[in-house]
Image: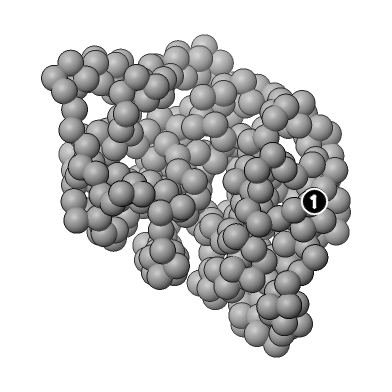
Amino acid sequence: MYTRRECLMLAAAPFVLPRAIDAASTSDKPMRGAFMILTTPFTAAGGIDWDDLVREVEFCDRSGVHGLVWPQGSSGVRYLTRDERMRGLEVLAKAARGRKPALVLGVQGRDTAEMLEYARAAEALAPDALIAMPPTTAKSLDDYAAYFRALAGVTTRPVIVQTSGGAPSLPPSVDLIVSLAREFPHLGYVKEESQPLVPRMRDELKHRPPMKAVFGANFGANWLYVMRLGLDGVITGNAMYADAMAKMWALHERGDTAALRDLFAKFLLMRNLGESIAGVDLYIMKKRGIFKAAVQRTERGAKVLEFSPDEVAEIEYRFAALQPYLTGDARS
């Protein structure tokens, strides 16, 4: 059920839709491949380092990735204020203009009204696509359906439905995802993260059309498997390894399975290290010259990360195995 506020916003929607919808608003950029969820960089004082965010866009573009996504879970979206999210959309729209990767702006909200505010702001910036988690305040799949139908009315661009991040223990069903895609063809894109993961992916792949693209996630940890299942790509917070991710997709497209398996194994050496050493990804962001500092934003504020000598030695030891596959650091 909609709240009174949501009903009023939906009733007004036909009169306030951005002008971009009046013209053709479909992107000619393919919605497949390696899509990087951008990590949000923070200063030691806890503010967003907007210059580093732009540098991250530039690095990902040079690395050959196919999409840039912000803000999602890997962006630390839960710690971002409304004003930071709004400014970030504008910063990224400007930074991504004229670049090869598709720009996908995240517009999720706690409820339909909050989502619509972000969606309208994003739509006005003419990105290539939108992405949204389900609403955290939902009580039923009907609430999810109403939320995504409202989003479908704001844009004619591709909309990626993320299956995680909504109400606790309430993943959107495959039937719901497929029915939304039938009703709104531009909603035929999904970032699948819910269990049982592989059966859901296989089920979604069987529904082409109306499904247009099925993406994996999971920080790329299962990407080798899902590529071989026939998925359309990955949406993941791996911008620090953007060049490796782009190369893996290129090897997959060429059918070079042996080289792909070898590169994926080297990537996993780094990906799995996060289970033992907190903050590895930010260490690599700083090491590669993408970020000036390794800083997390937490519920208690900014935290500048420090690493012991043995932690640094382990990170460098594993990174050395991956480095021959990389195209170069941001400041090299």
Location of residue 205 by image quarter: top right
Q: Residue furthest front?
A: 300
Residue 103 in the image, given as x and y percentages of width and height: 50, 57
User: Which part of the image, by quadrant, shows the C terminus?
Assistant: top left
Residue 287 in the image, given as x and y percentages of width and height: 20, 34
User: Which part of the image, by quadrant, shows the N terminus?
Assistant: bottom right
- Say if residue 234 shows up in the picture: yes
The residue shown at (25%, 55%) is: 46
Location of residue 203 by image quarter: top right
Name the residue tied to disc 1: 141
- Say if residue 123 shows up in the picture: no
Q: Is residue 282 left or right of residue 140?
A: left
The residue shown at (76%, 82%) is: 11
Q: Secondary structure at mark 1?
A: helix
Location of residue 74 by image quarter: top left
Using the image as rendered, state which of residue 219 and residue 101 is in the foreground. Answer: 219
Three-letter amino acid code at disc 1? Leu
The residue shown at (60%, 46%) is: 165
Using the image as rendered, state which of residue 139 and residue 154 is in the foreground. Answer: 139
Residue 198 in the image, given as x and y percentages of width and height: 71, 25
23 in relation to 195, above or below: below
